[in-house]
Amino acid sequence: MRIVVRGFVCFAILAAGNARAAGVGTGQAAGAQKPPAENPAAHNPHLGNRESINAGMMLYRIRCADCHGLDAAGYRGPDLTAVVAGGATDERLYDTIRKGVPGTDMPPSSKETPDDDILQIVAYLRNLGTVAPPERPVGNVTNGERLFASECQSCHRIAGKGGRLGPDLTRIGAARSRAALVREIRTPSAWMAPGYETVTLVTKRGQRIRGTKKNDDVFSIQIMDTRERIQGYLKADLQDVIYENVSLMPTFGPERLNERDLDDVIGYLSTLRGTETAAR
Amino acid sequence: MRPSNVIAAMILVGSAGLAAQLPEARLVTPQDLMDGLKDPTRWLTYSGDYSGHRHSPLAQITPENVGRLTPQWTFQTRTLGSFQATPIVVDGVLYVTGFNNNAWAIDARSGRQIWRYRRTLPEDLKICCGPVNRGFGVLGDRLFMATIDAHLVALDMKTGGVLFDVELADAKAGYSATVAPLVVKDKVIVGIAGAEYGIRGFIDAYDAQTGKRAWRFYTVAGPDDPGGRTWPTGDAYLHGGGSIWVTGTYDPQQNLVFFGTGNPGPDYYSNAREGDNLYTTSLVALDADTGARRWHYQFTPHDVHDWDSTQVPVLADLTINGQPRKVVMFANRNGFFYTIDRETGKVIVAKPFVETTWANQIGPDGRPILSPGHLPDEEGTKTCPDLGGGTNFMSPSYDPTSRLFFVTARETCATYYAFDQKFKPGEEYTGGGTQRPRDQKNFGALRAIDPVTGDRKWEFRYTSVSSSGVLTTASGLAFAGDGDGNIMAFDSRTGKNLWHYQLGFPMSATAGTTYMLDGRQYLLVPSGSVLTAFALPER
């Protein structure tokens, strides 16, 4: 009967799952509480076991991938690579999969779902988290930070400092592999994240307004222009709306950023693993 | 008699006198259901009438004045979850179902609640797609609702009180129900869902008075049934899927009900169920009194892309090649539009209405001619359309005057994966999954199709994929929504956009309905957890 949205899927609002796990709002008297049963994820026998990770991958693809993407980088549901790398504990992952998040598309697992199934999914997710982000920084981080400040910061924000036209990079080291960082710096137009696609609006008077598309429909469009002004326009009031396939981010090819400087910038970005809240 | 008693008696006499001047509440009869939308104050079935046209004879709102359509009231459910239902309209009152089988009776003049039904549901429901519901069926003074815990309940229209509550199947085993019942004569016809949990699908009829089951048709043929050899030996048929989750239609002349059936299970892993897997992803024509199968047509033999054929079968009488033909029209999730002889089940016209990479044409034997390289595997294969299909549960509409069929089309592709998966009772059983390719630019459109040729007459493109149904009216209007929350009106002959209103949430599986009340034509639109009623301004 599946339509588009799938069951046993999204990890939405992990924080809510956490609050529940912590007993917030249970109203129980402290003295009456039983000692909590140990979370099965506290001793997960599947962690690091290749066979278990493969089984977890299959379970993940079947049960979770529709919402969270086959690469776990998020589709309709949140980016789980960022969730895992951002500090979610195995116990928290287990609780969210087991209990779901009320009021969202993330349903609880059935009572019949064996703990092993969930623990294998956790092992798979944990494996993703250890493959991509924790690469050892290479290059000169200090020089990378200096290059970032001169070349990138006017558009990208880190920990509240910098521009807002491009994505916030406070947690980028936890959210992207080195390969992804290289790709997105060398060929930024190859894929533009939703919310950062380039658009040029032409007013009836011929004025051109360039920016990133935040939203649109048949009748209106909402953008951040290159001066960081967020504004909506009715398409009927415009002469033209030009959806561009070139990113506002310049292409940093080898002539603009040599291999050594690229290593330094990525080295710096890899240190950004972020406890501070990044705008999502 | 004390003075106070005298006053009380006067009030009673006065009330009785007043009541005598009011019209009696009319029961909904089988003939009323046959008459469909002849009485424009009512909307009694999922599609408005038995033919599935979702086409109203009303003409107060026209292409010329639709630009002045304005909201009159909104009703918010104050619950989580979105409407997927078509409201029933009976004599000034709306009856609508919502998330978790909540249901309401609402004053159609003001949007104010009259009663509310709440259902206590088990905590660990096994459902693929949310505790949604597609609406009531109605007969006499009873409303009928299929429930997400796989029951059929009858409610008192005046109070929302439960009259009967019967189990369709075991919810613990993954069975659930979301379809709006189809009421035919004295029977309430419903289907079961849960193909992602290894169920064996069926269509049931229940006595509207007693709730006793009258017949059952299994959408997955058993070993001894006709079609049983289209499944491997063993118990694969017991987990073969074939859900029913969109309301069928009824042809009184042939006494046949038509239902589209869902995907086989497991969804993607084909080795578990070699063969055509009848009667999944099919159109079945069943005797309304007995449930006996008269004929079937399988749109996607051995489906491996989760393309449930649970769309509305739309009935019409057409002239094709100079011959009068009784047909059923079907815009299928697999991306093809079909015109089928509804007396024989033979395909007359079959043509893609969206991009279909898996097959370009349907052969003379009615089977799709498959393109190579579209069997899902562990590495993934890209196929168009995606699992959401060329269209889905959103109702189409048919205008018998212009002879145009209207459908919300989805231009989408997906990478399909398949894995071996063992069946475990109560566990999800799909054998795979899908992902949208990152470079894939999906979009939606409202399309008008000539059912005689399958050719597209016009389209209006949306910037996003839409799941909105379509309503047309005799004044030459089509109403539909995009995926961004706009409800729009179009000239149904040209596709020109004439009006829009931002609802704040897209119509998903819902479509507009329209009715007359106090001399005004209302357009009623469910979106998110809100009902919005539109009308032209009062003079």
Image (cartoon, coloured by chain):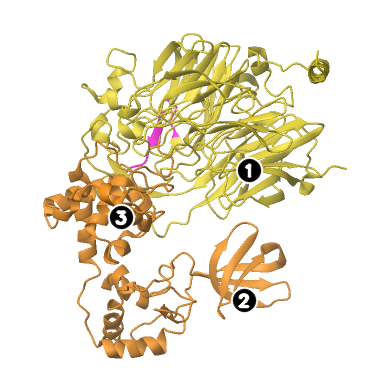
Using the image, tell me which numbered label, if any, was put on residue B217.
none
Give me the chain that's yellow.
Answer: B
Looking at the colours in the rendered structure, which chain would you say is drawn in orange?
A
Q: Earlier in the sequence, mark 2 or mark 3?
A: 3
Residue at image x 33%, y 87%? A145
Query: Residue A2 location, x and y as percent?
Result: 40, 38
Residue B480's label in the rendered image is 1
Q: Nearer the viewer, mark 1 or mark 3?
A: 3
According to the picture, the residue beneath numbered tag 3 turns out to be: A22
Instruction: Please state which of residues B118 and B531 is positioned toward the viewer in this rendering.
Output: B118
Q: Which residues are magenta?
A: B362-373
Residue picked out by circle 2: A209
Q: Residue at x 27, y 85 (%)?
A: A264
Is residue B251 left or right of B418 when viewed as pictured? right
The secondary structure type at the circle numbered 3 is: loop
Residue A209: percent from left, percent from top: 62, 76
Look at the numbered discs 2 and 1 and tell me whether their residues touch, using CB distance below 8 Å. Answer: no
**Cβ–Cβ under 8 Å for marks 2 and 3:** no
Give, as a three-letter code, the residue at label 2.
Ile
Q: Left or right: where does residue B271 sit relative to residue B365?
A: left
Give residue A224's quadrant in the image: bottom right
Against B384, residue B149 (above or below) is: above
Q: Chain of mark 2?
A: A
Q: Amino acid at mark 1?
A: Ala
Q: Main secondary structure of the magenta part?
A: loop
